[in-house]
Image: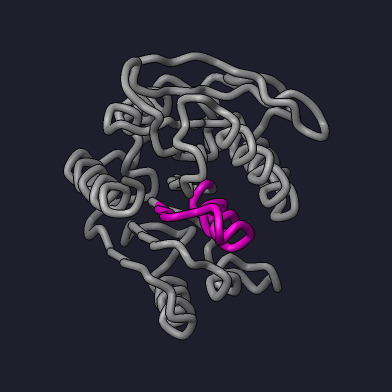
Amino acid sequence: MASKTVDIHMPDGLCDCYVAYPDSGGPFPAVLFFMDGFGIRPVLQRMADRIADWGLYVLQPNLFFRHGRAPLFDLANMLDPEQRPARMQLVLSVTPEIVERDAGVFLEFLAAQPQVEPGSPAGLTGYCMGGSMVVRTAAEYPNRIAAGASFHGGRLVTDDAKSPHRLVGRITAAMYFGHADQDQSMPLADIEVLEAALQDAGTRYRSELYEGARHGFTMPDLPGYDEAACEQHWERLWSLFGRTLF
């Protein structure tokens, strides 16, 4: 497995990114990996490696690059409840407009890599705050996205005019939503609203409730980690990418 850190020139600075792909063969389909609210760290890099091992070129950008290179903070400190406001300030700094603009640059980067299959639509996967970014990117670039997956995605339904659930009518990709049933950032009522929007739009999707799981169930370094739910997430992600990207 080949892996490296690359810097992508953005309109307002350099974005440091983790890249992983098989060290032989290719070219490969591309995957854009949207991080969770705790940022790029070894756990996320190992997740990118696992996806790359399926025969994919994975780009994992530091979405907080405007505040510094990853890692920006010590995870143990940021798990302190008193640090939540500071972390949420970082999360909210990545506005819908920034997500859509940055995603276009990331997709251009992927398309220019010699290891990436020319003209092949990309896959998306996102966790926590990355879940909404998956939806926004699939809606903003429908011709360039083949599949998108959101796991314990938060705030997919809001009162905002640009709420992710209001954008699904623009999506042509196959979508997967893996929700935790104990997630205050995406309660059951919001899941129902999202599913109704997906059905009304005729979006190709699967929505699944991981019973007993908490927010962050895919992350071994977070309190909500659930080994069984995490392995189920890997099965679902491979199933989605396996039938849409190859």
Q: Is residue 183 above or below residue 5?
A: below
Q: Is the N terminus in the top left, top right, bottom left or bottom right quadrant?
A: top left
**Figure label count:** 0
Q: How is the image coloured?
A: one colour
Q: Is residue 107 visible?
A: yes
Closer to us: 152 or 121:
121
Query: Residue shown at 43%/47% (left/top)?
Result: 123
Query: Residue shown at 49%/23% (left/top)?
Result: 19
Kindly give the residue lying farthest to the right in the view shown: 12
Quarter of the image for residue 211 reads bottom left
Quarter of the image for residue 159 reads bottom right
Q: Position of residue 145 (x, y in %)?
A: 50, 54
Quarter of the image for residue 230 reads top left
Q: Position of residue 114 (x, y in %)?
A: 51, 25
Q: Position of residue 152 (x, y in %)?
A: 40, 52
Q: Is residue 82 visible?
A: no
Residue 146: within the magenta? yes
Q: Position of residue 187 (x, y in %)?
A: 42, 67
Kindly give the residue lying farthest to the left in the view shown: 228
211 left or right, relative to 47: left
Residue 7: within the magenta? no
Query: Residue shown at 59%/74% (left/top)?
Result: 166
Dominant secondary structure (helix, strand or loop) of the stretch shown in magenta: helix
Query: Residue shown at 31%/45% (left/top)?
Result: 246
Kindly give the residue lying farthest to the bottom in the view shown: 200
* Span highlighted in magenta in the image: 130-150
Q: Is residue 39 above or below residue 132?
A: above
